[in-house]
Amino acid sequence: MEKRGVIEFNWIFAVIVGAAILFLAIFFVGRLTGTTQYLSETELAKNFDILLNPFASIGGIGQVSLAKTIDMPQAIQINQTCNAKENRITMFLRSESSIGKKWGEWSAPNQIYNKYIFSGSFMEGKSFDVMSKSFEMPFRIDDTIYILDKDYCFVNAPSSVKEELEWINLTKVQFVDSASACTTASLKVCFDMSCDIKISGQCVDAGCADKYDYGTVQKSGKSMDYATSSLMYAAIFSDSAAYNCETSRLISRLKSIAGILKQKASRLSGCPTTELISKLSDLESSSSSSIIDIYKISQEVNNANPIECPIF
Amino acid sequence: MDMQPCTDGDKLQLKACNQNKITLTMENKKAQEEIIGFMVIVVMVIVIGLLFMFFLKPKAPAAQESQQVSNLLISISHATSACDKEIRDVAVMCMNSENCNNENACDYLNKELPSLIDKALNKGGLGNVIGYSLVINGTSIDINHGNKTATMSGAVAPITSDLKMELKFYYP
Amino acid sequence: MQKKLANKKAQVKIQEMAFVLVAIVILGGIVFIFFSKFQLANVQKAAETVKQKEAISLLERISAMPEIKCAERGVEKFCIDQDKLEIFIPMAASSAYIKQWQGMQKVSISNIWPDEKEWTIYGKWQGNFTYSTFINVCKQEFKEASSWTCSLALMEISYS
């Protein structure tokens, strides 16, 4: 009888202690998983920012500098807001989770001060087309980065747009001759015709190389003025809040660079820079909120750049 | 436990006593084996843990040596010489036996290039360089300094179809 | 006698269990300490890697900044414009640009040859880690035609 009692006590003791150890282990693993997930989402957000670095400030001029499809190991959601006053973009990121809830925790906010990203404020997907193009007005300001998470169908695009975008083979951009050839889920981009996104070219002056040098983009009931193809693509691929904010940031930078060039022009002795200095001053102090007006002044600046001693 | 030999009592008691002793001995041995087994596991975990800690020390960032050498060579070739021509143009002048700054272009390069590279090395960013060589193929410029080793980092900058600059840094 | 033996056996068993538990707790404690150190090292390494990548990409970005980069008739040259650099330096610490240097302790350009000169774009004190790249710093002059005089320079970014 005593023998049986000894064995039973042994087992009871083992079970109680085993259960306590298991409980502690599961509790700490749960806590650790939460912390690890937050850490990895924050690291992912920072790495996404670093992934975009090759697209920023490449230093090229003219056509699209770089285009690539970024494939993430699992689906991610990106939430970004632009703040023109603070001159930054705040980006939150989270990835699909295989344990528990479908989406992990949002990462810590990642503040980006050195990029101009045109995209939707909320994006979701596993694969993103990323493209960058130099923004010049008339001198180079920086590279504009476009992130595409949706499909776009360009209907009867002008040759300048087609030549620029077709060769880079973006998976989310399609060129067709009529809207009926577009895939159902894609956003239709039409030139001087009504559809999801309508581009209206307004450049008809003598100095215009192309009708679409400046104009308006109508999208989701909103109208956005653009100038140069960089901002035309920006208006197509982003929402109006992001577009207006990022354009405002770019214009501030343009004015800053105009100020530097004005001072440089006055340092270069012997070089006929009087008219250029005056036009740069107009550009620097322009209070117009219209991007088209600023574009027109920038064209005057370009014409005033002396041929014998170009300042930019 | 009493391990004295079983002697007293009848045959049955002796048998039971011996059996008990054998059982106890076996149990003792089993218990000792279990303890040893457990200690082996504890020691293994400690050793593995120590190894982990040892290998977790953050390593110093690798020197960006190759790219640096390339950047240096390109920057040298575009630097302006005393005769208001880029170094790469002076190399062409050397090939054509022309003068730069009132002296033979090749003599000018032989004098200035080592000074230029020594200043760049003093500034750092190129790692622990113990020797270098700068050759402008197509000319007589063949500058060597310090020791040559098997561990090296180099770059080539083409100037013309007949002319190229080659810079190598040697490490211990 | 048998009862006494049984009691002793039971006590031995309890002692055995107690020792095993103590050993497991000590082992668990050691494993936990190692794991915590491992996790901490991982976090520190991740932060260190991010800072390294930021420093390297900042080097590339600064040399491509239109505020200081050489340019002539839309053709961008691989050099820093000395005049633009000197005009830009007082602006580098302004609210428009200060966030560009975030996390970095010092950003500077030093002329190496033919003459020596240093321009500090941002910061004062050298950090523990430094990344650098060789560049040309060029000055535009105009005597009948535009010309550029270039020197060999080193751009450095340091952080702690």
Image (tube, coloured by chain):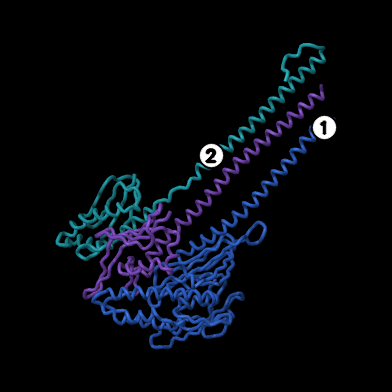
- Name the image quarter holding residue C132: bottom left
Give the chain ID for the purple colour: C
The numbered mark at residue A4 is 1
Chain of the residue where label 2 is placed in the rendered structure: B
In the figure, the shade used to draw chain B is: cyan
Label 1 packing within 10 angstroms: few (<14), some (14-19), many (20+): few
Chain of the residue where label 1 is placed in the rendered structure: A
Name of the residue lying farthest toward the right: A1
In the figure, the shade used to draw chain A is: blue
Q: Quadrant of the C terminus of chain B?
A: top left
Q: Does residue A195 appear in this view? A: yes
Residue A271 in the figure: left or right of residue B26: left
Which residue is at a point 26% across and 61% down the rendered structure image?
B162
Q: Position of residue B97 (x, y in %)?
A: 17, 60
The kind of residue tagged 1 is Arg
- The image shows residue A291, relative to residue B1, as above or below, that is below
Residue A121 in the figure: left or right of residue A12: left
Label 2 packing within 10 angstroms: few (<14), some (14-19), many (20+): few
Q: Does residue A168 appear in this view? A: no
> Which residue is nearer to you in this view: A163 or A215?
A215
